[in-house]
Each structure stands twice: as C-alpha cells, then as structure tokens.
Image (cartoon, rainbow, N blue to C red):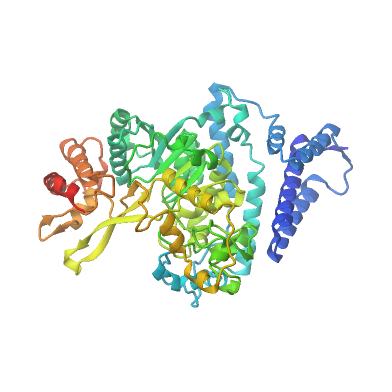
C-alpha cells in the first residue's frame, strides 16, 4: 500500500490554500471571465499534478492521520486569518543549520531558487513587435498640457501595442502560474518569520541590520565610490556594500584597501551562489540590481544606483514610520504607467474596469470630484481602475526594501528580471522611457498583495541651457524627494478628506477639479513649499571621466561651464565641486584604485594625461565659481 509522505501532504496543503486564497479574492472583489479562466487553470494544473504524480488510479492510498489533521488545522488557521501558524507548521521539520553550515545552506537555498526560476521561465522568444495602430508614440506625463494625451492610456489603446499571440499568452500564463506554485513551496521560512530568529538559523541570520548596496564593476566601481564619498560628506554612517558582478579581479585594491576606509566593502555573486549556479545562468545589465539586493547582507537595504547621490543624511530612513509599515518604498518617474493589460491576465491579477479608484497619483480625493459617472469608462486611463498597478511609473535609481517582509517580492522580481529582456520589460513598459527592471518590484509586491509606498512628489530636474543650440535646456540629473516628508504631505491630504461630506458636484465643478488641483495644493505649487531633495540621479551623462573627456562635454568654445545650476534647490550642495575634486585626487594624484580607466583608454599614457588635464581643469573651474554658484537663484 502506498503511503502519502508529509512532503506530499504539504504540497496538497499549499495547493488547497492557494485555491482558497484565489477564491476569497474573487468573491470579495468580483471577477471577470479572465479570473474564472485563471482559477480553472490553477485547479486543473493542481488536479493534473495530483493525478499524475501523487494519486495513481490503481494504487490504494493509506494516509497519515496526523498529516490529515495538519491539513484540517491549517484550514482553521487560514479561515481565522492566522497565516503565521500555517507557515510555521509547513516548515516545522526544517532542520536549523549550525553556524559552520551557514555558507552552504545559503548557497543551497539560492541555488534552488535560481534553478526554480530557470525551470519555470518561458521558453518562447518575444519578437517585441508592436502593432501599427499603437498610439504610444511618446511618453505621457501628468502636467496639464499632457491631459490631452491621456486617452492613449485606456485599456483598449494599451492592448493595441505589444503583440502577444494566443500561444505566447498561454505559455506565459502557464509558466507564471507554475512558478507561483513553486514560490509558495520554497523553503523560505527561515528568511521570513521574525519569531524564529536565532544565531543558529543561518539563512535568516544572513540578512541582518541596515545598510546600502550599490552595483559596481568597471566604470560603475568608480561611480559607486563617488556616491559613497557623497554619503560620507553628509555624515551618513550606514555601512555600504558594493556588488561586483562576475568578481572582476582588478578591483581588488579598491575593495581591499580603499573601501574599508569608508565603512564599505565589496560583495560578490559567489558569496551566495556556487560557481556551478553562476555558470548555469547568464546575468547582465538591469538584472544586477536584483542580484545585488539578494547578495547584500542587510535586512533593511537602500538600493542605490552607482550614479545616484544622496544629498542628505540617511541614518534614520529605516526608522521612519512609512518604511516600517510598508517595507518597500519606490520613487516615481516622469511618466504615467503603460503596462500592457495582458500582464494582469498572464499573472491572474484581478482588476475591475467598472470601478475607478484614482486620478493618476490622486487616490485621496473622492472620485465624484473629478468623475461625475457620466464619463465613458472606456475613455479612462486603464491604471486608474481598481486592481491595477498605480501611477506613476517607477524610477528605480533608488529603492528601499525590508527583505524579511518582502522576500517573496524579491524572488518574484528576480523571476521578472530573469525573463525581463525577453518578455517582462516590454510587457511592463511598452517602449516607455527607461524600459528595464524599473517595474519589476512594484509588480511583484502588487501581485503578492504586500504593502508598498510610492512617493507622490514628482521628480525634478537640474541642468543648463545649451549655448550652442539656441539655449535648449539639457537636463543632467533627476531630483528625487524626501520620502518621509512626502508621506507626511500624503497623510495630511488623507486627514483633510477623512469624515468630510462632499457633493453632489455640478458638472462645472467636476470639470474644474483636475489632478493639478490636488497636486499643487498638497505637494508642489505656488503656495506650497517643495519637499526637500534627497537624491540626485546623475544618469545622463554620468560622471564617467573617460566618456566626458573624450566627448569634451560641458565645454563651450574651449571653456568649462557648470552643468548643475540650482544649488539652492539641492540643499546648497555643490555636487560638481565634490565629484571633480574626488576624481582629481583618486584618478589623477593616486592612480592605484581604478585600473578600469587604463583599460578604457587602451593603456595609452598620453590619453590618460589628457583625461587628467580635463579633470583638473573642471575641478579648478568648480573651485573658482563655487561662491557665485551658491548665490545664484
């Protein structure tokens, strides 16, 4: 007679609980035919698995009474909303490794994670073809002069862009569903249950304390150092880890000698993955950021792009109420969301195109204030509807995350990033500016129904007017705002509307209440002080001395000029003086830490001298114009 093992019982428990959760969501929110199809798909997949691998027809099954009692107990816990009891029981027989086994246990866990991601990744290739009828011919913002283009963001119009065939859709849906089942079966209890933290719990003890992680490698190692220098200029004491992809050996002096002087160190993919796992997977580009989060040792982490500069002290960011409540903080891009509606069908995410819940970033004002129900719902931007990802699109130069609370978010985002270049980057952005990893974290958290906070204050820009091109403005840095102050503004808006009675509104009142009415009152307007700047994302161009020297950028008729011209807005911090002074010291006066520069210049000493001449001239110009720059409006 065949006996059901406890491992099999656990699979059945997972499957049944997943079905129960899906059913509860559908009953509570209402559902479409797509949702019906998704439930049917999950049901059929689970039944097929059980019939094929667990319950052969010709076998008589002898069940473990104790295991069956466990299932009954788990359903009691789920019905009572006691998820922790379910998770605790599911991993109760997991042995806690000793400290000596920590590295192996961590490596084993992540080896299993990446193997699972690879196993359930789509095998079909995306042609990235767009329909001729696609209306997304430009990025669409939220300013009043952008309102006329919002019709391009409706469900029908967003569906009319990226081409996904029926075969591709079914393949993506199947793989996503299979991965989700695997995700809920992963042995991640040690990483997620705070109640069982202990020194001998090796995976959980791997993630501890607070810190910052930056992706380095090649020119990004130098950029990361510039960012670290700025952190210390503002007396931020949080430790920093620089993630070196592929373990570039020529960064050894930088890692071993220079970084420790700044409470920083290098980390490598080999810290968490075996060489076999690294060789079996190809990692590159945007994927490095997700890998850096996984590889970093911090439980609470700020992921910072190497070309991003924090211009305020960050020591208290993880103690803030908004971070503790959500465990994930995201900053906005300039543009409204263009995610393909088919994503929600692929992932089985329920949305309701009959219920509008916001007006772009305004999810506070009563809908009646800007929508009198006479509007044709088909003309409403798709991501204003219930169940969809909220505006704005994400600017991922900075991200705050609690890895204990959001471990599943990180793993699902890794799945999206692993399959990003082939599928999910285009699905999430549909050719919008910055298409890449930017939407993977919010999509994962949204799918898992985990909390997150989006900064409402839109990004700013600093730059200069180009003398050689009719004074056209060139932005050189994205300015992102203080999320704690932003949240205070948001909470004030919520408090203003709480318990107040509004309406009925006349058609004239509805037409006059716009997104700008709300935004300018609470976040940024003529009578509203701007939220402080927290980050300068100097992404185009980057402070790469090789590229800037070779292009002779920031020069006109042989003379240098400043590219950042509003120092009062950026906390009276002279970023260029700091950066070029650092480059002068560590690239020209002391050449031992960044051998990448020699490779980039083909070991040509004349070129290196020319680059240093450019660096020194810029540093001298910044010193000479510093006082004037501080006093300029």
Q: Is residue 500 left or right of residue 585?
A: right
Q: Is residue 617 left or right of residue 544?
A: left
Q: Is residue 9 visible?
A: no
| Above or below, comparing residue 6 to residue 162 in the picture | above
Q: Can you tell which quarter of the image residue 7 is in? A: top right
Residue 428, given in percent of the width and then of the height, sits at: 51, 60
Residue 199, given in percent of the width and then of the height, sits at: 55, 22
Residue 622, given in percent of the width and then of the height, sits at: 15, 46
Looking at the rendered image, the quarter that the N terminus falls into is top right
Q: Is residue 226 visible?
A: yes
| Above or below, comparing residue 1 to residue 431 in the picture | above
Q: Can you tell which quarter of the image residue 6 is in? A: top right
Query: Which residue is pictured at 56% across the width and 27% down the height?
Result: 202
Q: Nearer the viewer, residue 465 or 427?
A: 465
| Above or below, comparing residue 374 to residue 617 in the picture | below
Total marks in image = 0
Query: Which residue is pictured at 62% across the width and 54% down the height?
Result: 176
Query: Which residue is pictured at 53% across the width and 57% down the height?
Result: 363
Among all residues in the image, which is located at the extreme bottom?
Answer: 133
Residue 203, given in percent of the width and then of the height, sits at: 56, 31
Looking at the rendered image, the quarter that the C terminus falls into is bottom left
């Amino acid at each position: 007679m065949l006996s059901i093992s406890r491992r099999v019982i656990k699979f059945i428990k997972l499957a049944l609980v997943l079905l129960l959760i899906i059913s509860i969501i559908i009953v509570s929110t209402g559902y479409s035919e797509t949702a019906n199809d998704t439930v049917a798909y999950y049901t059929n997949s689970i039944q097929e698995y059980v019939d094929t691998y667990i319950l052969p027809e010709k076998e008589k099954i002898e069940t473990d009474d104790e295991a069956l009692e466990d299932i009954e107990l788990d359903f009691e816990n789920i019905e009572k909303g006691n998820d922790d009891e379910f998770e605790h029981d599911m991993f109760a027989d997991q042995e806690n490794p000793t400290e000596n086994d920590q590295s192996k246990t961590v490596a084993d866990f992540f080896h299993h994670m990446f193997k699972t991601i690879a196993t359930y990744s789509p095998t079909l290739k995306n042609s990235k073809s767009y329909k001729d009828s696609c209306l997304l011919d430009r990025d669409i913002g939220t300013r009043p002069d952008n309102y006329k283009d919002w019709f391009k963001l409706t469900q029908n119009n967003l569906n009319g862009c990226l081409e996904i065939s029926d075969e591709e859709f079914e393949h993506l849906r199947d793989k996503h569903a299979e991965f989700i089942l695997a995700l809920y079966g992963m042995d991640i209890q040690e990483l997620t249950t705070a109640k069982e933290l202990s020194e001998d719990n090796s995976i959980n003890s791997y993630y501890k304390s607070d810190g910052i992680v930056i992706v380095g490698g090649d020119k990004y190692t130098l950029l990361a150092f510039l960012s670290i220098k700025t952190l210390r200029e503002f007396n931020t004491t949080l430790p920093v880890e620089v993630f070196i992809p592929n373990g570039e050996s020529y960064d050894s002096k930088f890692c071993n000698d220079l970084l420790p002087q700044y409470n920083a160190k290098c980390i490598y993919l080999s810290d968490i993955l075996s060489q076999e796992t690294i060789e079996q997977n190809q990692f590159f580009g945007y994927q490095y950021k997700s890998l850096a989060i996984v590889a970093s040792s911090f439980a609470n982490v700020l992921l910072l792009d190497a070309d991003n500069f924090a211009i305020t002290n960050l020591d208290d960011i993880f103690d803030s109420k908004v971070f503790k409540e959500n465990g994930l903080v995201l900053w906005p891009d300039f543009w409204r969301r263009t995610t393909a509606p088919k994503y929600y069908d692929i992932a089985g995410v329920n949305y309701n195109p009959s219920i509008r819940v916001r007006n772009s970033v305004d999810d506070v004002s009563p809908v009646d204030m800007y929508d009198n129900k006479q509007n044709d719902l088909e003309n409403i931007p798709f991501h204003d509807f219930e169940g969809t990802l909220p505006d704005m699109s994400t600017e991922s130069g900075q991200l705050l995350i609690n890895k204990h609370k959001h471990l599943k978010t990180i793993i699902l985002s890794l799945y999206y990033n692993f399959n990003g270049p082939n599928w999910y980057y285009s699905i999430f952005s549909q050719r919008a500016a910055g298409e890449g990893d930017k939407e993977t974290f919010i999509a994962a958290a949204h799918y898992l129904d985990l909390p997150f906070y989006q900064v409402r204050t839109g990004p700013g820009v600093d730059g200069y007017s180009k003398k050689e091109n009719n004074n056209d403005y060139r932005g050189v840095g994205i300015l992102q705002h203080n999320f704690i102050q932003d949240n205070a503004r948001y909470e004030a808006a919520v408090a203003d509307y709480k318990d107040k009675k509004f309406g009925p509104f006349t058609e004239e009142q509805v037409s006059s209440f716009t997104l700008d009415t709300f935004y300018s009152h609470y976040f940024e307007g003529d009578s509203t002080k701007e939220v402080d700047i927290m980050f300068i994302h100097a992404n185009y161009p980057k402070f790469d001395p090789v590229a800037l020297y070779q292009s002779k950028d920031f020069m006109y008729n042989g003379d240098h000029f400043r590219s950042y011209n509003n120092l009062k807005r950026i906390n009276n911090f002279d970023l260029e003086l700091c950066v070029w002074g650092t480059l002068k010291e560590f690239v020209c006066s002391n050449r031992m830490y960044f051998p990448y520069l020699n490779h980039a210049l083909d070991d040509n000493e004349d070129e290196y001298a020319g680059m240093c001449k450019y660096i020194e001239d810029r540093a001298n110009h910044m010193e000479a114009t510093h006082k004037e720059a501080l006093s300029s409006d």
